[in-house]
């Protein structure tokens, strides 16, 4: 085990600090903080996705702190400096189940001497975690903002039995493999033993992979035209880009490499080479398997069973959804966006699609995201900042 220091302040914006919090459900959790000087400030908890880190929130944290919040962004279990080292594929999946990720965050909140947070805000995989937090503990999480990945919520009681079928058994996988151009859903690939070794490598190799991956899923890639799918069929799913529905037998690095930016990323203002190096260094050290354990929990049915415990229950706190207008994420699971809007939340405040942003919305268009967050929060929390 390596005794890691916190993330170097030199790679962080001014007024953001990195530190560790011990005894967080067995973890030494690494986090970034802004607005931490005043313990009376209301707290915002920001949860990253894959392949991201707490660092993914660096562009929105200063403005949220300036508005009067204590902003906390942890590296989630298995990610970044919360992960002491690589996780083997055969490691126990129980610590990575959604109910244990909730316990991680409750322990973190307690370690910060908090009883509630004004909002839990999650992006991508972090949106699933944030939605689960709001569903399970509305007494702790006063509101929720979901980004890029809709949270379809718990099943209805009459649909509970069907919901417990592991996604690995979904007939869609055989149907995709049987297309004239054989395909594979990325969840199935990410849950396989091959995925992490395919993506692991030196910082230089990981940087090359991540540059192409981030570009391909951003608004900078010119081929994105997201739209609702007609249904959950192989033919409809195959309309999505290859980072979601891959060519069967092709690795993710091989899938995204042809879509790397022509300038190698030199012109990417929202993710400079210096910023990309933070991701590459962390993922080269930890490997990708720890983060991918969450996809394994989805495919083996663990996520469905954890949600099933709340069958018939809806998110009872105010909720907002934010995504980029060039993001396929809101549409990759047919019906999830509509279910989130109409059924999963009792106080759904609407969807916002930000122009000029793809999947990495809080990095690509940080000012627009910050404005939406700050407009939403004062109306929906008892923990609003004090006003002069």
Image: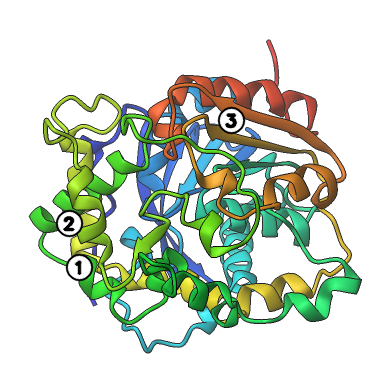
Q: Is residue 163 above or below residue 41?
A: below
Does dot 1 land on a helix, a strand or a loop? Answer: loop
Does dot 2 land on a helix, a strand or a loop? Answer: helix
Q: Residue at position x 25%, y 39% from top?
A: 9
Looking at the picture, how far across and down is residue 138, in whole percent?
Answer: 80, 53
Decide which of tag 1 and tag 2 comes sooner along the chain.
Answer: 1
Q: Nearer the viewer, mark 3 or mark 1?
A: 1
**In the drawing, does residue 232 fall left or right of residue 214?**
right
Q: Nearer the viewer, residue 52 or 341?
A: 341
* Picture quarter with the C terminus: top right
Q: Is residue 356 above or below residue 17?
A: above
Residue 85 in sight from this viewpoint: no
Which mark is on residue 69? 3
Residue 337 in sight from this viewpoint: yes
Q: Nearer the viewer, residue 374 or 226?
A: 226
**In the drawing, does residue 235 fall left or right of residue 30?**
right
Task: State the separation of the CA atoms marked 1 and 2.
Answer: 7 Å
Q: Residues within 10 Å of mark 1 (few under 14, many from 20)?
A: many
Q: From this viewpoint, which residue is outermost toward the top? A: 388
Q: Residue at position x 52%, y 79% from top?
A: 95
Question: Mark 1–mark 2 contact, CB under 8 Å?
Answer: yes
Q: Residue at position x 64%, y 62% from top?
A: 106
Task: State the separation of the CA atoms marked 3 and 1.
Answer: 37 Å
The total of numbered circles placed on residues is 3
**In the drawing, does residue 232 fall left or right of residue 60?**
right
Q: Which residue is mark 1?
A: 200
Q: Which residue is mark 2?
A: 206
């Amino acid at each position: 085990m390596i005794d890691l220091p916190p993330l170097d302040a030199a790679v962080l914006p001014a007024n953001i600090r990195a530190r560790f919090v011990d005894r967080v459900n067995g973890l030494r959790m690494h986090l970034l903080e802004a607005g931490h000087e005043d313990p009376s400030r209301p707290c915002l908890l920001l949860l990253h996705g894959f392949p991201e880190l707490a660092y993914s929130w660096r562009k929105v944290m200063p403005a949220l702190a300036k508005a009067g919040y204590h902003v906390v962004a942890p590296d989630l279990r298995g990610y970044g400096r919360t992960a002491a080292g690589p996780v083997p594929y055969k490691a126990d999946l129980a610590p990575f189940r959604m109910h244990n990720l909730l316990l991680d965050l409750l322990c973190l909140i307690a370690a910060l001497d908090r009883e509630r947070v004004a909002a839990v805000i999650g992006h991508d995989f972090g949106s699933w975690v944030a939605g689960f937090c709001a569903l399970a503990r509305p007494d702790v999480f006063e509101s929720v903002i979901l980004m890029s990945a809709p949270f379809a919520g718990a099943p209805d009681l009459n649909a509970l039995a069907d919901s417990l079928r592991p996604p690995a058994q979904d007939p869609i996988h055989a149907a995709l493999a049987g297309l004239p151009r054989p395909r594979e859903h990325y969840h199935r690939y990410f849950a396989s033993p091959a995925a992490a070794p395919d993506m692991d490598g030196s910082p230089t190799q990981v940087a090359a992979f991540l540059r192409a991956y981030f570009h391909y899923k951003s608004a900078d890639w010119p081929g994105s035209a997201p739209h609702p799918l007609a249904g959950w069929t192989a033919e409809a799913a195959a309309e999505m880009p290859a980072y979601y529905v891959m060519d069967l037998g092709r690795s993710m690095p091989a899938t995204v490499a042809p879509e790397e930016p022509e300038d190698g990323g030199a012109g990417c203002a929202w993710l400079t080479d210096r910023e990309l190096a933070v991701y590459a260094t962390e993922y080269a050290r930890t490997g990708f398997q720890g983060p991918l354990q969450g996809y394994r929990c989805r495919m083996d049915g663990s996520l469905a069973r954890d949600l099933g415990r709340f069958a018939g229950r809806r998110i009872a706190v105010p909720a907002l959804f934010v995504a980029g207008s060039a993001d396929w994420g809101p549409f990759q699971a047919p019906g999830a966006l509509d279910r989130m809007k109409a059924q999963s939340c009792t106080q759904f405040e609407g969807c916002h699609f930000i122009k000029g942003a793809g999947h990495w919305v809080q990095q690509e268009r940080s000012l627009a995201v910050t404005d939406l967050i700050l407009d939403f929060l004062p109306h929906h929390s008892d923990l609003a900042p004090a006003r002069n």
